[in-house]
């Protein structure tokens, strides 16, 4: 005998794994989510939903997958690193240590702005951002090749070691941890202090 609809809802609320919820699905258990989102009216003004909205430098989509923002960060980071080729020449260009400093101080903040929102760190054990992190990691590889003047066939680990750069997955971890510490150390008068304390507990 399969689960009743009431028992199924209780199991879902308790975050039970799908394989533990036995029984056949029926049309009665389905719920409909309106897509696209309906418009709302505030003080006589109709506000219509959009597929994409930029807020505080981040691109939010209706599903909160942040794929558009990741694509924007990839495009922006690629353009910045492409400027490396104009100044990072082995004989007449800027020294590698200065190019490394330029990458860390200018490019990394551009591509990892809001990383704790649109990326899930690999150390969290959750899925969802491996593909995006891999794509963004190509930017660091390009920068490392320009910094070290290495061959294109050089392995990523060797490029990062000689360029004195953290592996990109660890760089994402570092950025997310820094943002978490920044939020956790907000003064008590800050509007987000109570929310940060509640999330910590």
Image: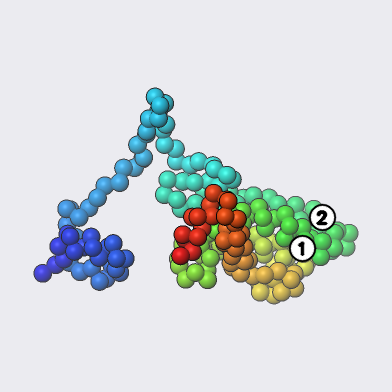
Q: Which mark is residue 79?
A: none
> Could you say where residue 162 lies in the image, as x and y percent from the top left?
75, 73
| Coordinates of residue 110 in the picture (x, y in percent) | 66, 52
Q: Earlier in the sequence, mark 2 or mark 1?
A: 2
Q: Is residue 168 visible?
A: no
- The answer to whether 180 is drawn above or below residue 157 in the figure is above
Residue 190, x across and y down, in percent: 57, 51
**Residue extending furthest toward the top:** 44
- Of residues 172 and 93, the one nearer the viewer is 172
Quadrant of the rendering where the N terminus is positioned: bottom left
Q: Quadrant of residue 91?
A: bottom right
The residue that appears at 57% across and 55% down in the rendered structure is: 188
> Could you tell whether 180 is left or right of 29 in the image?
right
Is 97 placed above or below 65 here?
below
Q: Residue at x 75, y 52 (%)?
A: 83
- The structure's colour scheme is rainbow
Question: In which quarter of the view is residue 22 placed?
Answer: bottom left
Residue at mark 2 to residue at mark 1: CA–CA distance:
12 Å
Q: Residue at the spot x=52%, y=68% of the render?
A: 122
Secondary structure found at label 2: helix
Label 2 crowd bin: few (<14), some (14–19), many (20+), radius 10 Å: some
Looking at the image, is mark 2 or mark 1 nearer the viewer? 1
Q: Which residue is mark 1?
A: 100
For this rendering, which residue is in front, 39 or 200?
A: 200
Residue at x 50% of width, y 60% of height: 197
Q: Which mark is residue 87?
A: 2
């Amino acid at each position: 005998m399969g689960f009743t609809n009431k028992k199924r809802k209780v199991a879902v609320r308790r975050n039970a794994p799908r394989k533990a919820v036995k029984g056949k699905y029926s049309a009665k258990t389905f719920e409909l989510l309106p897509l696209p989102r309906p418009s709302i009216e505030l003080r006589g003004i109709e506000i219509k939903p959009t597929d994409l909205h930029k807020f505080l430098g981040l691109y939010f989509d209706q599903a909160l997958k942040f794929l558009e923002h990741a694509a924007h960060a990839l495009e922006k980071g690629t353009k910045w690193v492409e400027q490396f080729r104009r100044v990072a020449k082995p004989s007449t260009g800027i020294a590698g240590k200065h190019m490394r400093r330029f990458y860390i101080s200018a490019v990394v903040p551009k591509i990892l702005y809001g990383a704790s929102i649109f990326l899930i760190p690999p150390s969290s054990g959750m899925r969802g951002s491996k593909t995006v992190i891999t794509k963004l990691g190509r930017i660091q590889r390009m920068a490392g090749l320009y910094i070290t003047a290495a061959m294109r066939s050089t392995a990523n680990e060797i490029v990062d070691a000689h360029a004195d750069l953290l592996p990109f997955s660890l760089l994402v971890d570092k950025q997310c941890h820094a943002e978490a510490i920044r939020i956790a150390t907000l003064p008590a008068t800050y509007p987000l202090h109570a929310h940060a304390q509640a999330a910590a507990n």
